[in-house]
Every structure is written in C-alpha cells, then in structure tokens.
Image (cartoon, helix red, strand yellow):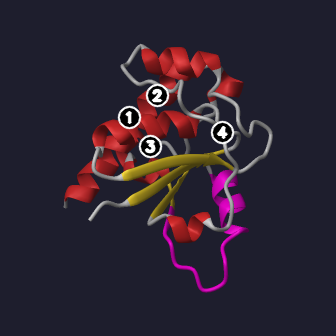
Amino acid sequence: MPRRILAVCLGNICRSPAAEAVLRALLPGDQIDSAGTSDWHIGDQPHPPMIRAAAARGYDLTQLRARQFVAADFSAFDLILAMDGKNLADIEALRPEGNVTPVHLFTDYAPETGADHVPDPYYTGDYDGALDLIEVAARGLARAAAD
C-alpha cells in the first residue's frame, strides 16, 4: 500500500521541495508532497538556486509550488518529515487532539551524518550541502521502508 509522506520546511521553497523531488525518485510508489510552516511564499516556485542545484542532480522542481502546512495534513499523510527542530515544533503546535501521525526530523533517517537538522540554504547559500544531506536522509528512509 502506498504511503503518504509530507516533507516540511519553513518556506517550502528550498529544503522541502528538494526532499519531495528526491523522495519521489526513490519511492515512486508513494505519494510525496511538501509544505512550509510559514505563509511567506504560497504559490511560488522553489528558490531559483535550489532549482538549479537540484536540476544538476536530475531533479526537476519547476512544477512545484509552495503551500502552507495545515492541521488537515495530519490526516492526509502517514508520515511528516520536518527539516529542523523549529519546523517540528511549529508542526506539532497544529496537531489535532488525538492524532497520532508520526512526525520526525528528516535527519533521523541519516544518523551516520551526525546532523540534527537540514540547514536552510536560503540563509547559508549551501544548496549542494543541503541536497547532499537530503539525499542521504531519503536513502535512509527508503531503507527503513524496505525493512
């Protein structure tokens, strides 16, 4: 049965759309989406430098558009992946009472990296570094799904 997985970052223009594209490539039978905890970029394409960095690795982000995470996402998805602790806290603040949908840091699936979050390349400028970590975490999630 296909899983429904949601990747969430702050603006849904860098990390989470990249994670969406990478997860779609690795888990083609699953339903993958992304969202942001803020409303700053609703309807916008991913950030151009992330589009370019992802394209260099074979991922097309151009059809994606930013949307805001909403409480209904807890019911619509089987797993929610936060890119950092602040996003995780913002997601949890919207959790409906009684909902048990798992929410994890994406880096939980990349313990070998020692990373506790995916740094935001919008601020760091390191789009390739963010993609490196996203790919490692996505492969870890794919391995966990296969077990």
Q: Are marks 2 and 1 in contact (CB under 8 Å)?
A: yes
Up-down relation of residue 11 to residue 80 (above or below): above
- Magenta stretch holds residue 108: no
Residue 83 in view: no
The range drawn in magenta is: 85-103
In terms of secondary structure, where does tag 4 sit?
loop
Q: Which residue corresponds to the image point at 67% horizontal and 45% vertical from the top-left? A: 67
Of labels 4 and 2, earlier in sequence is 4
Q: Which residue is mark 3?
A: 114
Q: Of circles 1 and 4, which is in front?
A: 4
Viewer-nearest of labels 4 and 2?
Answer: 4
Q: Residue at x 52, y 66 (%)?
A: 76
Is 97 in the magenta?
Answer: yes
Note whether 104 is above or below 141 in the view shown.
Answer: below
What distance separates the C-alpha of mark 3 from that of mark 1?
Answer: 14 Å
Q: Which amino acid, by three-letter code, is at mark 3?
A: Gly
Crowding at dot 3, Cα within 10 Å, few <14 / some 14-19 / many 20+, comes out as few
> Amino acid type of disc 4?
Ala
Q: Position of residue 50 (x, y in %)?
A: 57, 22
- Residue at the spot of label 2: 131
Secondary structure of the residue carrying numbered label 1: helix
Give me the disc on residue 6.
none
Q: Badge 1: how crowded within 10 Å, few (<14), some, or many (20+)?
A: some
Whole-angstrom CA distance, mark 1 to mark 4, is 20 Å
Residue holding disc 1: 135
Q: Which mark's residue is nearer the viewer, 2 or 3?
A: 2
